[in-house]
Image (tube, rainbow, N blue to C red):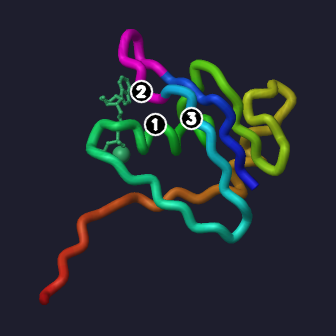
Amino acid sequence: MIKVEHLYKNFGDLEVLQDIVTEVKQGEVVAVIGPSGSGKSTLLRCMNLLESPSSGQVLMDDEDLMDPKTNILNVRQKLAWYFSTFIFSRI
Ligand SMILES: Nc1ncnc2c1ncn2[C@@H]1O[C@H](COP(=O)(O)OP(=O)(O)OP(=O)(O)O)[C@@H](O)[C@H]1O
Ligand SMILES: [Mg+2]
């Protein structure tokens, strides 16, 4: 289970993520949708610490990713990133 608790992320004055609260249970499929620039990739990057959240918590199986004692490389072994691409189909 991945839990996101009151996550905030800003780049200088730009507040990209504000008070994001969500959880993803094992086996669950969740789509994050929104306009370009709304912060989808930033959210995913915060969820594996490719970006450092400004505040809030990300928990992977109750392990706090921001806890200095957490081995982020071990956590990342449970995460995969699929890059989005355009898909064209003939109709
Ligand atoms: N490292 C960064 N430094 C400064 N601003 C950033 C950085 N990364 C993202 N941003 C800004 O944060 C906002 C959210 O970007 P993000 O890439 O998360 O959006 P997105 O929803 O994934 O967009 P898209 O659908 O185009 O992939 C944008 O305004 C972007 O310019
Ligand atoms: Mg993106």
Q: CA distance from mark 3 to mark 1?
A: 12 Å
- Magenta span includes 34: no
| Residue 66 picture quarter | top right
> In the displayed structure, would residue 58 be above or below residue 79?
above
**Quadrant of picture, ligand 1:** top left
Disc 3, SS: strand
User: Label 3: which residue?
Assistant: 20
| Location of residue 62 in the rendering, given as x and y in whole percent from the top left corner | 84, 44
Asked whether the beta carbons under mark 2 and mark 1 sit within 8 Å of each other, the answer is yes
Q: Residue furthest left?
A: 91
User: Which label was assigned to residue 16?
Assistant: 2
**Chief SS of the magenta region:** strand
Neighbourhood count class around disc 2 (C-alpha, 10 Å): few under 14, some 14–19, many 20 upward: some
Say which quadrant the N terminus sits in: bottom right
Query: Residue at left 74%, top 35%?
Result: 65
Front disc: 3 or 2: 3
What stretch of residues is rendered in magenta?
10-17
- Residue drawn at (46%, 37%) of the image: 42
Distance Cα–Cα, label 2 vs label 1? 8 Å
Kind of residue indicated by mark 1 = Thr
Q: Is residue 54 above or below residue 3?
A: above
Mark 3 or mark 1, which is nearer to you?
3
Q: Is mark 1 within 8 Å of ligand 1?
A: yes
Whether tag 3 and tag 1 are in contact, CB under 8 A, the answer is no
Query: Of label 2 and label 1, which has the lower sequence position?
Result: 2
In the displayed structure image, the side of residue 8 where residue 26 appears, left or right? right
* Residue receiving disc 1: 42
* Observer able to see residue 3: yes
Q: Quadrant of the C terminus?
A: bottom left
